[in-house]
């Protein structure tokens, strides 16, 4: 019948719980287009006011009309009719007579709304104001001056002196608070303000007085029966002609009903916000499941989001294996609680039979109330006071468990929370299945990739072995041939070299005897004629030079043979300590013919390019422990490549360009502090592009014309240095400026 509409009652809200926490009666009342009326809803607290059950009122609204005081019935109906017609906010007070004969005063407020079908719906609130009315009646004779104002405004009007103190009786204040003037005079009125609001009220009041300015505040004021009511307070200064404040006039307006309605609305909004947050969490988890197949990420997100939203002490995910126990793998908890990650060997046929296998949630507001002793003992052991657990069935008989718990105090789980977690669990079950399928496919892909790598490595190994076999056979044959040639040359050279010195002595003796003959005997004309024709004096002079030239040639042949024998040590299997500089020099000796000046055809012009200069910058090296035959092969290959690069550069230059920038090979050796030996071979040839530089050590890769390179030289050199000697071989090169190869091997 009488209502105040603040949209308190809504089909989606649990009205019974809201109504149970509010004073008065919440209802929904409708006036049909045909003039009939009906009470669609009335909260159970109508029993305290009308002594009627809510069902009886809904069945027959006349039971309420019958209780209205006869003197107030007409005015009540008129006010309702007026509000239905104007749809203006409605407020009214009237009396009722209960079934037991008690007279009560009621207050009602509402905002009527017309529906599309012509019905007018009232959502509102009834309040029992009998106590207030009785208080008003008890003070009516002493408050005649204020009664009309109070009844019209439902407010408390008061007056203070300029300094803000009560100096005269305040009938309205005393009537409402029950305080006599002796208690409120001065600043005593502050005692009626709620303790939590008292300091704030006093500060605002003193600030207004100091300005002076309008005083506005809201606080709770204690009524005569001890109940606190919400008040909206406003006071203004009354000015003297000279501009000073004469007094303050203020009014307290009771806004308790509004505050209660706001509280209900806030509670409703909070509930809807919580539902929205829960829906958002569910959607977020579902989206992550769709966007990610990483099970660890999904589980981490689920437990963290649930723990944050529900504000539980701990949320964990664990794997459960019958006969073994729990394995807690994911956890989100209050920072002051210890971690529970790990394995727990707890087994219960009751747990498996009653909860795990049938996928039945375990809900316990108090774990001490769990009827299964082994479960109760387990939860108490890990510090749970309240627990909510959901099993998840995974493929192939595997189970997961999502558990929320309160460890610091008991918690009563709400149905909405249970429904939320159940929805999350359903999504997790799908996610885990998808993640396992994805993990299996990834594992299959990894195995395939691993097999492909193994095949690729096997192919590379086979290629290296093939290269090594080809090169080993080639160099072995070459070494044997070179060694054989050196041996065959060495025997006659030794014979010649060994007889040169005696021959020189013999010839010198003969020349000395001939000289003595010429001094002692005069040659006959015939002998003199032959001596003149042979230019005998020149012959004697040149003979000694000829012998020296033969000796130099023999020594040269012997050096070459020695170099060939040094270089031919290609098949030596053991490491030996050798003089590295001697072996470099032997290699240069073999390549000496390629270093000499050479004829170059440039267009139609032929000319000889200058000799390639070799600059030796040898450091002080100890004897190096290495496979010297193989190391000689590397040095030979790098020097040959340097000569090739210089010749290639010269083929595209004029004689003047070559003379201005002649070919030079720098050979540098150093003993590094790390007990390593470094050999650097640099040229000022054509250099290499980055794409060529990145592949120079690949087998069968060559930049030389067909027939001039196999692509094996640098690949084998790399294997000899890196694999055989556990060293390093790398190259720096700039196109047009040459290249530098660096060998580093342990000393």
Image: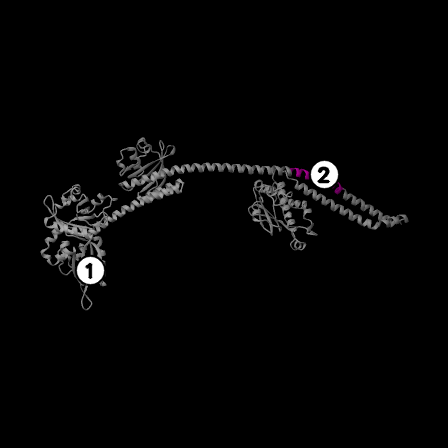
Q: Upstream in the sequence, badge 1 or badge 2?
A: 1
Q: Which residue is mark 1?
A: 235
Where does the image place residue 407, in percent across and percent down from the top left? 30, 41
The part of the image, by quadrant, that contains residue 437 is top left
Vertical placement of 720 versus 6: above or below? above
Reply yes or no: does residue 159 show up in magenta.
no
In the depicted view, which residue is nearer to us: 69 or 210? Answer: 69
- Whether residues under marks 1 and 2 lie with C-beta atoms below 8 angstroms apart, the answer is no
In the depicted view, which residue is nearer to us: 497 or 435? Answer: 435
Where does the image place residue 596, in percent across and percent down from the top left? 69, 49
Where does the image place residue 3, in percent across and percent down from the top left? 19, 49
Q: Secondary structure at mark 2?
A: helix
Q: Which residue is mark 2?
A: 488
How far, Cα to Cα, is label 1 from label 2? 131 Å
Q: In the rendered image, is residue 291 in sight?
A: yes
Where does the image place residue 245, in percent across and percent down from the top left? 19, 65
């Amino acid at each position: 019948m009488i209502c105040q509409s603040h949209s308190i009652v809504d089909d989606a809200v649990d009205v019974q719980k809201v109504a149970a926490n509010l004073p008065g009666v919440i209802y929904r009342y409708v006036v049909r287009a045909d003039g009939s009326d009906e009470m669609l809803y009335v909260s159970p607290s109508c029993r305290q006011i009308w002594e009627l059950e809510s069902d009886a009122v809904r069945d027959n609204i006349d039971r309420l009309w019958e209780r209205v005081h006869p003197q107030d019935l007409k005015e009540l109906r008129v006010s309702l009719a007026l509000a239905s017609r104007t749809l203006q906010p409605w407020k009214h007070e009237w009396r009722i007579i209960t079934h037991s004969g008690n007279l009560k005063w009621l207050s009602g407020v509402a905002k009527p709304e017309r529906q599309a079908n012509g019905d007018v719906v009232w959502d509102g609130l009834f309040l029992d104001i009998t106590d207030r009315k009785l208080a008003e009646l008890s003070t009516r004779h002493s408050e005649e001056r204020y009664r009309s104002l109070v009844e019209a405004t439902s407010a408390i009007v008061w007056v203070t002196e300029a300094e803000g103190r009560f100096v005269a009786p305040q009938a309205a204040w005393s009537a409402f608070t029950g305080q006599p003037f002796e208690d409120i005079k001065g600043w005593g009125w502050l005692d009626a303000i709620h303790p939590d609001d008292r300091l704030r009220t006093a500060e605002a009041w003193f600030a207004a007085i100091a300005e002076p300015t309008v005083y506005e505040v809201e606080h709770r004021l204690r009524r005569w029966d001890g109940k606190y009511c919400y008040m909206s307070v406003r006071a203004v200064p009354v000015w003297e002609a000279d501009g000073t404040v004469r007094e303050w006039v203020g009014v307290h307006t009771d806004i308790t009903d509004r505050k209660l309605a706001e509280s209900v609305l806030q509670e409703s909004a909070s509930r809807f916000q919580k539902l929205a947050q829960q829906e958002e969490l569910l959607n977020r988890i579902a989206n992550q499941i769709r966007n990610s197949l990483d099970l660890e990420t999904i589980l981490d997100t689920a437990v963290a989001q649930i723990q944050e939203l529900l504000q539980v002490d701990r949320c964990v995910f664990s794997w459960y294996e019958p006969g073994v126990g729990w394995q807690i793998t994911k956890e989100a908890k209050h920072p002051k609680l210890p971690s529970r990650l790990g394995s727990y060997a707890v087994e219960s046929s009751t747990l498996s039979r009653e909860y795990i296998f049938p996928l039945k949630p375990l809900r316990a507001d108090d774990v001490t109330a769990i009827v299964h002793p082994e479960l109760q003992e387990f939860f108490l052991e890990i510090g749970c006071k309240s627990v909510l657990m959901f099993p998840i069935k995974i493929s192939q008989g595997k189970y997961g468990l999502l558990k929320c718990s309160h460890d610091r105090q008991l918690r009563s789980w709400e149905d909405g929370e249970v429904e939320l977690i159940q929805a999350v669990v359903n999504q997790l079950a799908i996610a885990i299945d998808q993640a396992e399928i994805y993990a299996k496919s990834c594992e299959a892909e990894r195995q395939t990739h691993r097999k492909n790598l193994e095949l690729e490595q096997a192919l590379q190994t086979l290629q290296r072995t093939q290269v090594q076999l080809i090169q080993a056979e080639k160099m072995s044959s070459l070494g044997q041939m070179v060694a054989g040639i050196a041996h065959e040359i060495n025997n006659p050279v030794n014979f010649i070299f060994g007889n040169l010195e005696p021959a020189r002595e013999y010839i010198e003796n003969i020349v000395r005897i001939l000289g003595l003959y010429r001094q002692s005997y005069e040659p006959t004309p015939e002998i003199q004629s032959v001596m003149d024709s042979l230019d005998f004096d020149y012959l004697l002079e040149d003979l000694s030079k000829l012998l020296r030239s033969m000796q130099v040639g023999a020594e040269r042949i012997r050096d070459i043979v020695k170099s060939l024998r040094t270089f031919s040590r290609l098949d030596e299997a053991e490491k030996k300590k050798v003089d590295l500089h001697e072996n470099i020099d032997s290699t240069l000796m073999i390549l000496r013919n390629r270093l000499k000046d050479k004829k170059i055809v440039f267009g139609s012009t032929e000319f000889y390019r200058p000799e390639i200069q070799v600059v030796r910058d040898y450091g002080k090296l100890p004897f190096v422990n290495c496979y010297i035959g193989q190391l000689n092969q590397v040095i030979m290959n790098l020097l040959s490549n340097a000569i090739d690069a210089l010749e290639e550069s010269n083929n595209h230059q004029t004689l003047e360009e070559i003379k201005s920038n002649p070919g030079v090979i720098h050979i540098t050796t150093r003993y590094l502090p790390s007990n390593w030996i470094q050999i650097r071979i640099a040229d000022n040839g054509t250099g290499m592009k980055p794409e060529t530089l990145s592949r120079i050590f690949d087998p069968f890769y060559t930049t030389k014309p067909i027939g001039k390179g196999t692509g094996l030289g640098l690949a084998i050199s790399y294997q000899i240095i890196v694999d055989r000697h556990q060293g390093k071989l790398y190259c720096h090169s700039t196109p047009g400026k040459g290249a530098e190869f660096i060998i580093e091997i342990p000393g």
